[in-house]
Amino acid sequence: MEYRQLGGSGLKVSALSFGTATFGGGDAFFSAWGNTNVAEASRLVDICLEAGINLFDTADVYSEGLSEKVLGKAIAGRRDQLLISTKASFRMGDGPNTLGSSRHHLIRACEDSLRRLNTDHIDIYTMHGFDALTPVEETLRTLDTLVQSGKVRYIACSNFSGWHLMKSLAMAQTHGWTRYVAHQAFYSLVGREYEWELMPLALDQKVGTIVWSPLASGVLSGKIRRGQPAPEGSRVQQIGSEGSRISDEKVYEIVDTLDAMAEETGKSVSQIALNWLLQRPTVASVIVGARNEEQLKQNLGAVGWALTAEQIAKLDKVSEIPTIYPYWHQRSFAERNPLSVPSYKER
């Protein structure tokens, strides 16, 4: 397993991290992801640790806290062998203050997560989404307090716009508060918008990228092709693909290229899709999930090798999407405004 520095921090995280949204299966939505119980979760944690994965990702909102509870029990007795990332900000109750990134909600959310995880600290505490109603100063001061108290080691954000993140970084620097070291973001061969603004920002400000949904809810699992519907009972068949906004035909073109590359390399479609992400700038870790041991071991095969420059260029070309303004205009001024990831035409 390769270990990468997380943004500008001194923390090293495994190139692949394990997502535990499949733990618990507390409602119809999360049951479509999985219903992993404590015994099954313990076995998956075993496999991850044996493979060198040291980062485990969860969130308070996953099955209304069940994911955190199951993870906490699954890691009992080996907490010092791993890092835990959990998230807050989304609704966790019916009251007016049971959501968001206010001081009131975050302190309670952190305490609740610590209790469910049965731990005294959270290694990476992530804001699950941007709260436009709470002043950025209030959120950052609260997070800094949690770090100073020892309950949180590092902070991160997720699903922020460029200005959300840049304003937060500037505010933290101004006041000497703890800054975001990572941005957990949607990024894959079928969703490359992250490259337009958030990746250049991450490069400039040394913010590590932790990728969520790298296989686009199973679209890039190798099970979906032209004339081949999603398997019965699969996540994408039950709740659809989250995040992907490209046409079905574009998806099929990408999968066709992955199929050809799988024949060429002897790797699976999903392993190639994950390996492509691991070659991208700013990417510190890619979150993989699994309903069972077979899926987990398949995903673990994404590391230990690398696509060639030619293969990456082919994938870049087939997955390229039209850019919106101002990004298409900025690309015409590449002499002074270089792309974070050179296009296949420039390779």
Image: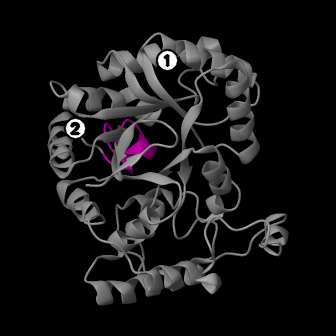
Q: What is the residue that sits farthest to the front in this orientation?
A: 336
Residue 37 marker: 2
| Residue drawn at the location 73% of the way across and 23% of the way down | 174
SS at mark 2 in the image: loop
Q: Residue at x 52, y 82 (%)?
A: 313
Which residue matches tag 1? 147
Callout 2, which amino acid?
Asn
Tell me which residue sits at (49%, 31%) in the image: 87
On whether residue 28 falls in the magenta region, the answer is yes
Q: Residues within 10 Å of mark 2 (few under 14, many from 20)?
A: some
Rendered location of residue 141, percent (x, y): 64, 16
Q: Which amino acid is tagged 1?
A: Val
The overriding secondary structure of the stretch rendered in magenta is: loop
Asked whether the residues under the numbered discs 1 and 2 touch, taking CB atoms below 8 Å apart as contact, a structural biologist would say: no
Residue 274 figure quarter = bottom left
Q: Is residue 229 left or right of residue 198?
A: left
* Structural crowding at the residue carrying mark 1, measured as other residues with C-alpha within 10 Å and reported as few (<14), some (14–19) or many (≥20): many
326 shown above or below 40: below
Residue at (64, 86) in percent of width and height: 345
**Separation of disc 1 and disc 2 at Cα?**
31 Å
Q: Nearer the viewer, residue 319 or 181?
A: 181
Q: Can you see residue 36?
A: yes
Where's the C terminus, which quadrant? Answer: bottom right
Above or below, comparing residue 76 to residue 82 in the picture? above
Q: Position of residue 35 (x, y in %)?
A: 29, 43
Q: Is residue 3 left or right of residue 297?
A: right
Q: In terms of image quadrants, where is residue 230?
A: bottom left
**Of the pair 214 and 7, the residue shown nearer to us:** 7
Q: Earlier in the sequence, mark 1 or mark 2?
A: 2
- Closer to the observer: label 1 or label 2? 1
Which range is magenta? 20-34
